[in-house]
Image (cartoon, grey):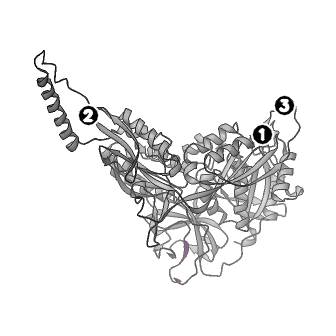
Amino acid sequence: MDTSLIRNFCIIAHIDHGKSTLADRLLEDTGTIDRRQMMNQVLDTMDLERERGITIKGKAVQMKYEHTDGKTYQLNLIDTPGHVDFGYEVSRALAACEGALLVVDAAQGAQAQTLANAYLALGNDLHIIPVINKIDLPMADPDRVADEMVQVFGFDEDEIIFTSAKTGEGIAELLAAVVEKVPPPRDSTDDPLRALIFDSEYDSFKGVIGYVRVFDGEVKRGDRIRMLGTGSVTEAIEVGVFRPGHTPVDVLQAGQVGYIATGFKEVGESRVGDTVAVESRPDTESLPGYEPLKLMVFAGLYPSDGESYENLREALEKLQLNDAALSFEPESSPALGFGFRCGFLGPLHMEIVQERLEREYDLDLIATSPGVAYQVVMPNEEVVTVANPSLMPSPGNYREAREPWLEMTVIAPSRFVGAMMELFTQHRGVYKRMEYISAAMPTEDASNAVFDGRVLLQYDLPLAELLADFYDQIKSRSQGYASLDYSFVGYRAGPLVKLDIVLNGKPVDALCFVVHRDNAYEAGKELVEQLRKLIPRQMFEVAVQAAIGSKVIARETVKAMRKNVLAKCYGGDISRKRKLLSKQAEGKKRMKMVGEVEVPQEAFLALLKIDKR
């Protein structure tokens, strides 16, 4: 196909600004899907996406569009997620496109993720078409939002397109703008094959199916292909495009977006971000990929029934084929048995993975409290990454510990600035800048925060602080009007210590965690108080201690159950009673030396709910 008739673009926006509904109207207006088969969020195929009203996995689809110039164009659309946790999905989509629709809600205006996605698109040298959506809403103020987009992003007023994805208003103008403004891909069909894998899924018959953007050359069914990153070689079982389901075609050419069924049974043989080339050209240069995957949050997943361990392993392996951002490795816990230490992109990603495992693979899971990966500088200058707190060296065995930091961007109405700054200060935030991005608009109701002036706040914040209740606090302190975005900025040294929980003189690995030294006493005191209530009483006294290395910072005692050995002594000499009490004390002392104290699973689950900042 003539590459001048191809347009590759994606939709980027803050969460709940109407991306999926806008994609529905584009599919409907181009006749890609029959009106009788249309439904809301047609590209969101998972039940979880429909229930939550969010896009979790990016979706690709090919549309045919007849322009007013009489030519028929091939439009390849990639719909992307809007939540900050799925920014990795967005970066993958941007690497496969030449243009992007930047969608903004006409009632809410530009949000934190709007800014982040716009900068990502500019970094990938994409042409951005500004779109103001939901202009049919009673609360919509398109003119104010347009002024804001001109001020924040530098767009010209005449290039902004006003649409309503619900009613279809402005969709025809939007399609025409895609053809006229998004540049066509480079014509390199005669060059050796190079295709970028931007996503993948698993099929039990076709193996790993790679979603690809072909940059150079062409690929046909039956061609011998090589993954340049892994060196794996296979035959292209099938090639095709998305209309919107899998539709086989004879050939995929330069500029097109489609899929290649590889037949691989393991995700490691065909990784997202890899370059596909012909087998006979192993010296082909790999395509520049998008930014590498950065796992931010780690947690343990355990089956509630120990016999389901192998079922959990199989489920994680299958889910990893559809979710390249998931990683896992085996681990064991004295309290929960055998399970897996999993890495996630963020708290929402962790929640989605757990729910998918329980729904799609019929598993009953226990998830430990999320934590982050730390870097430890050893005395020999070696830098060790520690994702499991139990593997953290004791104080004195390393030079310094580093924790991951984020650059946080919050956009909120100006009347909530004080509350936002106080929250960041309480969570060890470091102030960077503050900028007013829109002035207050006069309204009859002075308390209406939608039309209040809005402020952009930037802080640096440790990732561990975000995992507590930070997001909920942002929403509650701003009455739901603030939006949050973050990006990883690197590791910074800090006074971090491993807090051990010691029962009867023996540390419990499953309960240890890394904490800032200033917060260690409060966290340790709360933990031992809860454990004292949750651990069942023994025949001997149990000491529950929180310790940093060999230094105990908090202690509680689980009192022993006591048998009344004097019950049968109705009188007689006091020495008889003392002898019985002395004998009982010696017995309890021996029991304490050899007795084992186990944390019941119910107690362990209750401890997961404690804020351990």
State the image quarter where residue 587 is shown. Answer: top left
Q: Position of residue 418 (x, y in %)?
A: 73, 42
CB atoms at circles 1 and 3 under 8 Å apart? no
Q: Quadrant of the N terminus?
A: bottom right
Residue depth check, mark 2 versus mark 3: number of the one nearer the observer: 2
Q: Mark 2 or mark 1: which comes first in sequence?
A: 1
Q: Position of residue 157 (x, y in %)?
A: 88, 55
CB atoms at circles 2 and 3 under 8 Å apart? no
Q: Position of residue 91 (x, y in %)?
A: 63, 62
Q: Who is closer to the viewer here, 499 or 109? A: 499
Residue drawn where x is 62% and y is 49% of the image:
55
Q: Mark 1 or mark 3: which comes first in sequence?
A: 1
Q: Which residues are magenta?
A: 270-289
Q: Which residue is mark 1?
A: 415
Q: 480 left or right of 548? A: right
Residue depth check, mark 1 versus mark 3: number of the one nearer the observer: 1
Residue 277 is one of the magenta-drawn residues: yes
Residue drawn where x is 66% and y is 40% of the image:
475
Q: Which residue is mark 2?
A: 538
Q: Who is closer to the viewer here, 211 or 397? A: 397
Q: Which residue is mark 3?
A: 445
Structural distance between the alpha carbons of marks 2 and 3: 63 Å
State the image quarter where residue 211 is shown. Answer: bottom right
Q: 372 left or right of 153? A: left
Element type at mark 3: loop
